[in-house]
Structures are given as structure tokens and as C-alpha cells.
Amino acid sequence: MRAMERREARLFPERRDAAAGPAGRENGVRRALLFGLVCLALLWLPGWVRGEGISPLHVVTNTYTDTKKDNGAIVRLWQVETAVDTVSEEINGIAAAWAEERGADLPKAANSTSRNSRLDVEIRYSRTGHSYLSFLVQARTQYHRENTDQVFTTRTYDMSTGERLLLRDLFDEDPHTWEYLAEGVRQGLTAYWPDVEPDPEKLEALCGREALEEADFTLHGMSLVLHYPAETLYEGKKTIMAVTFFYPQIRDMMTENAYLETDNLSYYRTCALTFDDGPSGTNTPKVLTSLMETGATATFFVIGNRVSEYDYLVQREHDEGHAVASHNWHHGNVTKSSGAALRAMPARVNKAMVKAIGIPVRYDRVPGGRYPAMIKAKVGWAYIQWSLDTYDWRGRKTSEVMSKVKRAIQDGDIILCHDIKENTPETTRQMVRYLEEQGYMLLTIDELFAKDGVTLEPDTVYYRCQNGDTSKRDDT
């Protein structure tokens, strides 16, 4: 059955039953009665079913311990506790084995800052629906703040059964479905390092049906992401390449369970958490740690002239599943720059970004929100503003920021924060927990707009995205 026919069968089962004759019509009546009873039952179930909180099957405790070796090298090992013991044991076992194996031969650290030696074994998790939970386990070796080696693997589970899911469990058998996925992988992987031609045979091998069925992937609020080590196609590169499919593109190709478990707009409100002005060598790592603890993704608007110095942090932002965007080349007032200088900015920013993470940025946030000068100069970026300013840039305490968020948050909001501020890591942790309790699914900027089918256009300004409305909120 083709995708549209499957969708109609899901949405209009009476058509299928009527076509099957009297017996089919009788089944249709039974199914309608059952559906009504299920809907009635849902009204009495706990609030999380209606999107008013996080599902118990999605609750994860993610903590780490640091071990300092005799030569000064550091091993940071993350471990998780989930609702299913067998899932926790498998994920923790992978991480612990890598910590022991890859932490044994770390070189001596000259100091604990710029000339460090460390192994970070991270466990990142993400959720969708009411019971699907994904994990990405990564062991990243770093020497003098340069990523020297890495290995990763992914696991996705139906936490209601504890069973692991592979990509072939999420999609139907229609050959067109797998051709669509193959073409998406092909385009996504060749978008990295656009001036470098990957080995065509290796690329095609990754796009084959068998390789796709076994591919590493994670499920998020509004996207399925396939993960590939960059060195598979690009020699010497350590980035984790991400190929993203947004749910509106692929849900009609999915199996029945996967279709329901990716219907997040029926279960949750959404918002996007964004950070400006980084990277900061002190506070950005702490913000990333808070996001890892809470299983949230965010969007980092990075200042271009800081990318070279902090490329290891920009790469970490990208590898940990966050969106990386532009905050201009420098944090100056754009009204004082010439049109020619502004038009030259994307090339400068993207040169630094491609060197750091392999791909150019897709959109920009202008420092101070001064986008009119950029539009007048026809720079050509899409511009992401915000609809909820936390004012953390004023040095506000976490309690003050939380008071503002609790008072002002609305569905579809873009929340403005700054990862260079001292209080922001703890604010991030508390904010994510609160928003989850209130039934919000945190999305990247890309996901927020993709959920409503909004394409980001050049020289256009976006404040939020709620049912396709991207305008400025009336009350801000």
C-alpha cells in the first residue's frame, strides 16, 4: 500500500471497511466503538497523556563521574537510569566498556585547561511520542582541546516493551520509501565539506537498503536523525555527520506504531531554546552539560570570529545534536558597517563553520536584533528573532529568569538566552525541567519551523512558529 493510501486507511478506516462488504462494515462499527471508548478513557488518564507532562517511560536520570588518572588525564563517564532496567544496563555497559578500554592509554596532561588530556564518554538521550526513547553513546578523546578520536553507537527502544528498534522497524516495505531515505542520506552526507568529493563507492554503500536498515539513528521531537562518522567519507575529519528527516516528510511512510509515536503535535506544545554570543570556554561547556542531563536540544547562535579559537566547542554543539547558526562575524552594531561589509559576512562565517563542523549555517540572528540593516544590504540570510527574552544577558538570577518564563511562555515560542552568562547553565537545567513538566517538547529552530511546513526564506524575519504564524507576539 502506498503512503497516501496508508494514510487514508489510518484516518478513514470506514472506507476500507465499507469496501470489504457487510463483514467489513461490522468491523468498522466495532472499531468506531472501540475508538470512542479509548478516547473516553484518555480523559481519565494522567496529565502526561494529554501533553501536560513527561511520560513516565521517558524519565531518565543522566549523571557523570570524573576520574583523574595518575598522569593528570581525565575520564568523564556518564551513566543513566531509565524506567526499564535492561535498557539502563545495556546503555551503561557500552559506556563503561569504552571508558575502560579507551581511557587506559590517555597521554599525559600538561595542565587541566588548554593543554588537557581527557576522554568524555557521553550518553545523550531524546524522546518522541509516549514510549520511544533514543540514546547516542559517544566516546570522544581530546588532547590539547583537539578531538583526536571518537567512536559512537545509537540505540532506540520502545520503552513500553524494552525492545530495541531498528530503522527497518519504523518504515514500511514500499521500495519508494527506502529510495526516498537513500536520496536523503546521499544529499545530507555530500552537504558536508562542499568543496571535497567523497568516495562515490563508499557513499553509495551507505545508501544501500541493507546499510540503511542497520544505520545508527535517533528520534527527536520533530525529526529522525541518522548519524555517520565523518572519517567514513572524509579522511581525517572527526565530526559526527547528521542526516535529518523531519517527521512531516516521512510519517506517512512509517509503520502504524512509529506513525503514532511521532505525532508529537497531538501530545505536546513546542518551543525552541536558543543561546547567543558564544562560544565561551567557561560557560558553554556547562550549558551543554545541562542540556545533556535533561535530554534537550537547543540552537546556538555563534559569533563567527570566535569559531576558530573554540572550534572544539562548536564541534561539540554540532555532534551533540544541537543546531549551530550565525550570530554575525562579530558582535558589533551592524548599522555602523557598510553594505559591502555586511554582504561579505556569510562567506567569512561559513568558511569558519565548514572548517569546524563541515557544513555552512542556514540562518542568522543579528546582534541586538538589528536585522533591518542586514535586509537593506541584501545579505541573504533568514533572520531568527525571539518571542520570549529571558534577560539573562542582564545577569539575572535563575529565580528571576524562571519567573519570567513561567509567566510568559507560549506555544511556539523562541526563547532567548546567552551561553556566556554565569547563571545560564543552572537556568537551562531548571527551565528544561519546568517546560517538560508543562507539556513542552523542546525543538531546534529547524524543527520548530519544519513542524508547520514553514520554509525559512532569505531576508525574512521570524519571531516564533505557532500553526505557521511567525510574527511578533502582540504582548512583547
Image (cartoon, helix red, strand yellow):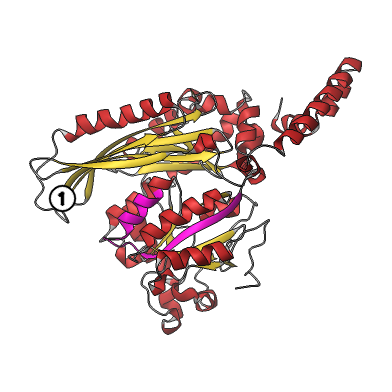
Q: Work out which quarter of the rendered image holds the C terminus and state it.
A: bottom right
Task: Establish if 342 lies above or below 138.
Answer: below
Residue occupying the point 61% across, 60% down: 410
- The residue lying toward the viewer, choosing from 148 and 400, is 400
Query: What residue appears at the point 47 percent right and 51 percent down from the top-left corner?
Result: 433
Answer with left or right where residue 320 lies relative to residue 473. Answer: left
- Kind of residue at badge 1: Asn
- Secondary structure under tag 1 reads loop
Task: Give the mark count.
Answer: 1
Task: Please identify the quadrant where the N terminus is shown.
Answer: top right
User: Residue drawn 54% across and 25% down?
Assistant: 168
Left or right of residue 25: residue 435: left
Residue, far right: 22
Is any part of residue 348 visible from this angle?
yes
Where in the figure is residue 390, as x and y percent of width and height? 48, 67
306 horizontally vs 87: left or right: left
Residue 425, image quadrant: bottom left
Residue 198 percent coordinates (x, y): 37, 40
Compared with residue 457, is residue 229 higher up or lower down, i.e. above or below?
A: above
Image spot of residue 255 (x, y percent)? 63, 27
Examine the structure image and report whether residue 282 is included in the region drawn in magenta. yes
Q: Magenta residues, as a range?
A: 269-291
Q: Looking at this view, is 301 or 379 the one in front? A: 301
Q: Which residue is mark 1?
A: 116
In the image, farthest residue toward the top: 23
Q: Position of residue 407 (x, y in %)?
A: 57, 65
Disc 1: CA contacts within 10 A as few (<14), some (14-19) or many (>=20): some
Do we see residue 324 in this rendering? no
- Quadrant for residue 125, please give it: top left
Asked whether 400 falls inside the magenta stretch, the response is: no
Q: Residue drawn at (59%, 55%), measured in percent from left and top?
A: 449
